[in-house]
């Protein structure tokens, strides 16, 4: 990579209109003068501000579609013809030259494609490599071993890319197509996600030193307090515990106790570097790829019951209306008295099924009362509650999927969520109050244009939209609450969610629009999120030890912008990887159900066809060509119409038949069963009503 290319990449990542000579000199030191000479023609110099990219050029990521491509820009995206991409590919960072009638890629600055997962087909004379993703270029493979066999799944390292070819070298064997869960391994490798921890990282954890005597002297001993954990039944990385005590004056002491991962994972160590690289744990169907090794995530750090554990406690005093009067953040030692699951807590809260401990029952019932009140407070200040569901795969002992169901949030999950939100806000407020460097979870206001498009869709469905106050939380609340328990609930919530900005990490406290929170940070999950871990590190240095404060402030101010960008990017990558695994596992589950019929909901429409969702949460596609008869899409009414008066509209409940499962593309195609009998639909609607 040339140094000028580095300037372009740096300029793009800075996300600023101008860069000064001082910034260039600070970044590139001795090369600054030569670089400034090379920048002539590409950059314009403004005496008052510095250098900015010439209006004749644009920097951005390529979004390559079937027949056209776009250069993603903050304002209006630039359109590029496929012939003008040169050797640019999807998601590459490129420099584009703007002409009067067309735009053309002149430099590929940063490649997105670095690895390819491919399947091996071998016969006597040839070895063929079939990439798992379709490319519009030939994939050439060099230096592969003779030991490859038919059915091997391999990783290829991209060496170079030209206009017509992707040249690769053999890297490693991932597995064989007959191996269990090879589909998940393929996805993990496609996303270049670290799967195993390097041996040197694991070796570095063999002799972890704990100064128990010192920790007992410097931590508050809460081992006698009645502290519990509530998690999913299959969770092993328990990083939060809670407690509640009523004080003599009628107030309540709510304790949120979080695993002190920062005690075991010191900055700059091998395990810290590996945790930063991953930035988050990835939850894939029936497995977890942890951010930190199991010896920590499931052992030393996990708040397992009846074991003394090091924690950081956020203790809040609530008045009789459950508002925070005061708070304290301190290092602690706890012993969890019970390891509860969401299921059994919900059985207590929803069905009054005792946990055989009156003290525990009473505490949980009071906690739920507080949780519901906190939820009401969030709503009043502008917090928006979106109904979110996840697919849960039920597997047998051999790991085969035997069922799929939608996992929904209930009172027990909301209880933990409410307490974690309150602790997160309290810690964020404390950092703001003390004017300390911090890493915040921010969620900016929706883009007006995207929100208007979303409201147009909902208006066509007959929803009471308010264009004048379109991005005011109260207006969005009205839509989400008004759709509750109606056929349009899922569609309304998902349409609005797609119009929202993505939450991300930032060293600046810009508030959280979705929660209606002025200050918000992630404090409660340091086992699985790096931003929480680094926040704990700052709590330790700024609030507990208070040594070399100036040096610490300078250090964190310097690293937090990069940490925020990296962890936000890794979070997005993990989410996409998890979705791809869900699609693959959904296809695997449905593979033997081709020809079967299912009740479904039409959840999205477009010219080419419509997306449907089954009761299980699995989604699929109905192509226009698979509809019986001639249909035209009416965008104004979000309806497919035919000349026989048989229409299909967004939000309709239909009976569908599975006609095809494409394991490579991770797609399922359905057709609508054209039948006078509506028993399945009625059965589905009755079950929803109940």
Image (cartoon, helix red, strand yellow):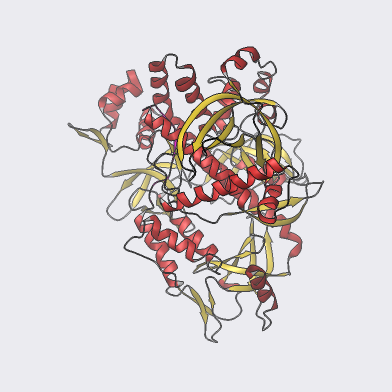
Considering the whole magenta stretch, tell me its main secondary structure.
loop
- Across and down, in percent, residue 319 comes to 48, 40
Residue 507 vertical position relative to residue 353 in the rendered view, above or below: above
| Residue 135 in the figure: left or right of residue 118 | left
Q: Which quadrant holds residue 592?
A: bottom right
Please state, as top left, top right, bottom left or bottom right, where the N terminus lies in the image: top left
- Across and down, in percent, residue 204 comes to 65, 18
* Closer to us: 467 or 133: 467
Residue range highlighted in magenta: 435-445
- Residue 348 seen from this side: yes
Q: Looking at the image, which residue is at 80% across and 49% down?
A: 396
| Residue at the limit of the structure toward the bottom, as seen here | 644
| Residue at the limit of the structure toward the front, as seen here | 248
- Residue 132 seen from this side: no
| Residue 558 in the figure: left or right of residue 226 | left
- Across and down, in percent, residue 690 comes to 66, 68
Q: How many tags in the picture?
A: 0
Residue 208 vertical position relative to residue 610 in the rendered view, above or below: above
Residue 459 vertical position relative to residue 280 in the rendered view, above or below: below
Q: Looking at the image, which residue is at 70% across and 32% down?
A: 304
172 part of magenta stretch = no
| Residue at the limit of the structure toward the left, as seen here | 47
* Closer to us: 580 or 547: 547
- Across and down, in percent, residue 371 comes to 55, 47
* Closer to us: 365 or 339: 365
Residue 365 vertical position relative to residue 109 in the rendered view, above or below: below
* Closer to us: 422 or 182: 422
């Amino acid at each position: 990579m040339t140094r000028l290319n580095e300037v372009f990449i740096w300029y793009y990542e800075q996300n600023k209109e101008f860069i000064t000579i001082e910034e260039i000199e600070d970044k590139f030191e001795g090369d600054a003068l030569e670089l400034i000479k090379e920048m002539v023609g590409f950059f314009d110099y403004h005496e008052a501000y510095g250098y900015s990219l010439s209006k004749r050029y644009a920097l951005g990521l390529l979004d390559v579609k079937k027949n056209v491509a776009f250069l993603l820009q903050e304002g209006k995206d630039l359109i590029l013809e496929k012939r003008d991409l040169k050797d640019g590919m999807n998601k590459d960072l490129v420099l584009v030259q703007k002409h009067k009638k067309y735009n053309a890629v002149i430099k590929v600055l940063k490649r997105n494609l670095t690895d390819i997962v491919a399947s091996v087909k071998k016969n006597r004379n040839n070895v063929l490599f079939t990439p798992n993703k379709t490319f519009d270029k030939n994939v050439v493979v060099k230096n592969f071993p003779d030991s490859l066999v038919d059915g091997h799944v391999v990783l290829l390292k991209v060496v170079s890319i030209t206009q017509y070819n992707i040249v690769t070298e053999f890297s490693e064997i991932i597995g064989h197509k007959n191996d269990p869960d090879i589909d998940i391994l393929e996805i993990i490798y496609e996303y270049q996600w670290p799967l195993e921890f390097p041996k040197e990282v694991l070796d570095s954890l063999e002799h972890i030193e704990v100064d128990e005597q010192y920790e007992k002297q410097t931590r508050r001993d809460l081992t006698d307090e009645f502290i519990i954990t509530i998690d999913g039944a299959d969770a092993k990385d328990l990083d939060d515990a809670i407690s509640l005590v009523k004080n003599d004056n009628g107030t309540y002491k709510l304790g949120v106790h979080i695993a002190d991962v920062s005690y075991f994972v010191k900055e700059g160590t091998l395990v810290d570097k590996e945790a930063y690289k991953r930035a988050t744990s990835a939850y894939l169907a029936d497995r977890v790829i942890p951010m930190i090794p199991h010896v920590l995530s499931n052992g030393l750090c996990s708040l397992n019951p009846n074991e003394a554990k090091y924690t950081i406690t956020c203790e809040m005093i609530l008045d009789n209306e459950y508002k925070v009067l005061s708070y304290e953040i301190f290092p602690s030692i706890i012993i969890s008295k019970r390891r509860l699951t969401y299921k059994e807590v919900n059985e207590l809260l929803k069905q009054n099924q005792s946990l055989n401990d009156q003290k525990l029952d009473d505490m949980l019932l009071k906690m739920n009362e507080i949780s519901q009140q906190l939820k009401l407070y969030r709503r009043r200040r502008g917090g928006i509650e979106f109904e979110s569901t996840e697919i849960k795969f039920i597997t047998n002992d051999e790991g085969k999927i035997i069922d799929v169901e939608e996992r929904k949030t209930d009172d027990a999950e909301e209880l933990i969520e409410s307490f974690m939100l309150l602790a997160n806000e309290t810690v964020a407020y404390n950092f703001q109050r003390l004017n300390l460097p911090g890493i915040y979870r921010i969620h900016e206001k929706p883009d007006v244009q995207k929100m208007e498009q979303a409201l147009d869709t909902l208006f066509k469905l007959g929803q009471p939209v308010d264009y004048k106050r379109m991005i005011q939380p109260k207006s969005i609340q009205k839509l989400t609450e008004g759709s509750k328990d109606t056929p349009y609930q899922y569609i309304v919530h998902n349409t609005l969610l797609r119009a929202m900005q993505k939450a991300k990490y930032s060293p600046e406290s810009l508030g959280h629009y979705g929660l209606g929170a002025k200050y918000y940070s992630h404090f409660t999950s340091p086992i699985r999120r790096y931003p929480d871990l680094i926040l704990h590190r700052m709590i330790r240095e700024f609030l507990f030890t208070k040594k070399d404060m100036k040096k610490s402030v300078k250090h964190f101010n310097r690293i937090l912008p990069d940490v925020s960008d990296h962890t936000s990017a890794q979070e997005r990558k993990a989410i996409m990887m998890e979705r791809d695994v869900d699609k693959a596992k959904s296809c695997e589950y449905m593979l033997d159900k081709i020809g079967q019929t299912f009740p479904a909901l039409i959840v999205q429409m477009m010219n080419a066809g419509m997306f449907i969702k089954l009761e299980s949460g699995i989604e699929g596609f109905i192509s226009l060509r698979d509809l019986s008869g001639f249909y035209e899409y009416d965008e104004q009414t979000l309806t497919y119409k035919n000349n026989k008066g048989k229409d299909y509209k967004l939000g309709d409940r239909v009976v569908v038949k599975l006609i095809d499962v494409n394991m490579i593309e991770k797609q399922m195609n359905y057709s609508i069963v054209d039948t006078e009998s509506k028993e399945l639909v009625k059965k589905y609607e009755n079950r929803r009503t109940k």
